[in-house]
Image: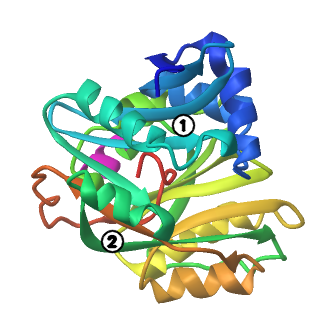
Amino acid sequence: MTDVALRALDRADLAAVHALSQEAGWPHRVEDWRFALDVGSGVVAMRDDGSLVGSAMAWRFGPDVGTVGMIIVSRAMRSRGLGRRLLRHAVTAFGAGALELNATAAGLALYASEGFAETGRVVRQHQGLLQPVMPLRADDVELRPAAPDDPAILALDREAYGADRGRAFRRLPAETEARIAWRHGAPAGFALCRPFGRGHVVGPVVAPDDSLAAALASALLEQLAGRFVRMDLMDGEDALAGLVQASGLAPVEPVVTMRRGDRPEPEAGTVRTFALLNQAMG
């Protein structure tokens, strides 16, 4: 593929990578790409005529953990090995450490051939026009507004995710809303909501149990009736999944979490992740 060269993704490319994602049917806005680039780094594929025909990105959270995503190849350049080339470049640029990604069925074979193994986790995306939500309440809990980079939120996410994602939380859009659940004078969980794609995304949702996760999500969803909303749920969370489906958010194609390299699972703690920040960053 001598007519295609790879170089670093920069802000001057945002309009072009946005157009690339639109061609692929992705919902991302230019602002969503800007957030991704503010938090991570990327590579783009350029033809000799100056057209941008591919992208890949990676994000590092601490010294040993990261994710890879935003891998797109234009229709005209597919089935030529460019996706593999972009993935390899992103993995090499990331360096040492464990990398995770969320793979559609179409990408599983490619990622497996490049050393990524299925972790057993499935993420189920739900989206649609939100129907009115009946607020849910959890016993002995007070839900309070907060900044998305509140130290309590960062600590809870670090416990649930197993690595420090503070860089991402500090660069979330100014319109991001957050709720913290306080129980017996201590933070017990949180949920975030921000503009994304066609409307809003709710996530991450971090809590000790499914019922509190649903209460946190409902506190944000009840403000979004009639708007397009997306959530990426970890599989098997019945109370939260029930709330989401009752709110009119339909499931779409699930993705499978894959990993390359050794990453210790987060230590068993009091909280876990019920809905993702996004599929690219986990």
Label number found at residue 47 = none
Answer yes or no: is residue 214 visible.
yes
Identify the main secondary structure in magenta.
helix
Q: Is residue 55 left or right of residue 136?
A: left
Q: Is residue 154 left or right of residue 116?
A: right
- In this view, the residue in front, 48 or 191, is 48
For disc 2, the neighbor class at 10 Å (few under 14, some 14 to 19, many from 20) is some
- Look at mark 2 in the image and give the residue it sits on: 208
- Look at mark 1 in the image and give the residue it sits on: 147
Name the residue at the front extreme: 2
Q: Position of residue 74 (x, y in %)?
A: 65, 40
Indicate the amino acid at tag 1: Ala
Answer yes or no: is residue 273 visible.
no
Q: Position of residue 168 (x, y in %)?
A: 44, 33
Residue range in magenta is 154-158
Asked which quadrant contains residue 88, the reply is: top left
Q: Position of residue 79 (x, y in %)?
A: 52, 50
- In this view, the residue in front, 50 or 26, is 50
- In this view, the residue in front, 156 or 35, is 35
Asked which quadrant contains residue 151, the reply is: top left
Q: Earlier in the sequence, mark 2 or mark 1?
A: 1
Q: Is residue 134 above or below residue 260?
A: below
The secondary element bearing badge 2 is classed as loop
